[in-house]
Amino acid sequence: MTDLLTEETKETKNYFKIGTIVKTQGLRGELRVFPTTDEPSRFELLESAQIFWDDSQPPKTYAIERVRFHKNLVIIKLDGIDDCTAAEQFIGTNIKIPREDALPLDEDEYYQADLLDMPVFTETGEKLGTITQILQTGANDIYVVSAPNTKDLLLPAIKDCIVSVEIAESFENIENPENPENPENKQGGKMIVRLLEGLREL
C-alpha cells in the first residue's frame, strides 16, 4: 500500500491522506508530521501542503518552505507560519494530496482508499461483509471485514487468502448506494477470498 485515503465525504473522497500533524517542533513554526504513506520521502516532492481541519470542508493550501526527517517523523515548515503559537493551530490536522498525484502502484498493490468499504465474498459467493479497517502489522496488512451481528473477520493480505480484487473504475457516481443497477457495492469493486483454516474463529 502506498498512500492512505480514509475520508468519506463527497468533497474529499478523491484525496489521499499522507500524514497527520501531531506536534510543533521548536520555536520557529516547524511541524511534526506522522506519515501515513509507505514513502515518507514523497514529502520532499511537495511544493505545497493541502491541510484538512475537517473532512467536510475544502482544504487550505500552504507553500512548503522546507522538509526534513527525524526518526519516524517528517518535519515541515509552512510559509508564513513562523512561531510556535502560529504552528499550534495545525495540531491534529491532516495533510492530503489529490488522487491523481498519488505514487504509482506495483503489481498486486492497491490504494487503501479503494479497499475501504469494499464488499468481500468467498469463492462460492457468500458475502462476508465489507472492509472497514486496514491494519498494518509490518509483515502484511490485515483487512478487517465487518458485518451486522457478527464478529469482525481478520483477513491477512496474502496470496493464499486473497483470490482476486476488482477495483472500481470510477469514483464519480458513488453518491447513491441504492442504485438498483449496483446494489451490492457503491464503489463497483469487490474482493474474493479463500477462508484459511481457523479464520472464522479469530
Image: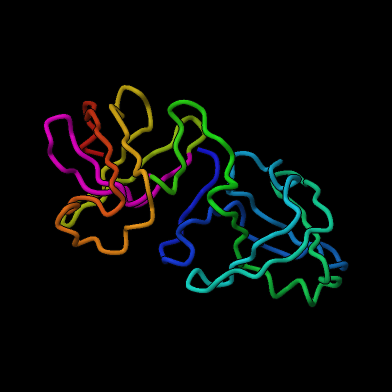
Position of residue 7 measured from the top left corner of the image (x, y, whole percent): 45, 60
Position of residue 8 measured from the top left corner of the image (x, y, whole percent): 41, 62
Q: Main secondary structure of the magenta part?
A: strand
Q: Who's the residue at 60% across and 54% down the image?
A: 97
Q: Quadrant of residue 26?
A: bottom right
Picture layout, residue 54 above or below residue 15: below
Q: Nearer the viewer, residue 80 or 176?
A: 176
How many numbered marks are there?
0
Quadrant in which the C terminus appears: top left
- Residue 126 on the magenta segment: yes
Q: Who's the residue at 62% across and 54% down the image?
A: 19
**Image check: 27 left or right of 130?**
right
Q: Quadrant of residue 89?
A: bottom right
Picture layout, residue 94 above or below residue 104: below
Q: Who's the residue at 55% across and 71% down the image?
A: 58
**Image check: 198 left or right of 105?**
left
Picture layout, residue 65 above or below residue 43: below
Position of residue 71 measured from the top left corner of the image (x, y, whole percent): 74, 44
Position of residue 102 measured from the top left corner of the image (x, y, whole percent): 57, 44
Picture layout, residue 129 above or below residue 84: above
- Residue 166 on the magenta segment: no
Q: Nearer the viewer, residue 69 or 7?
A: 7
Q: How is the image coloured?
A: rainbow
Magenta-drawn segment: 115-136
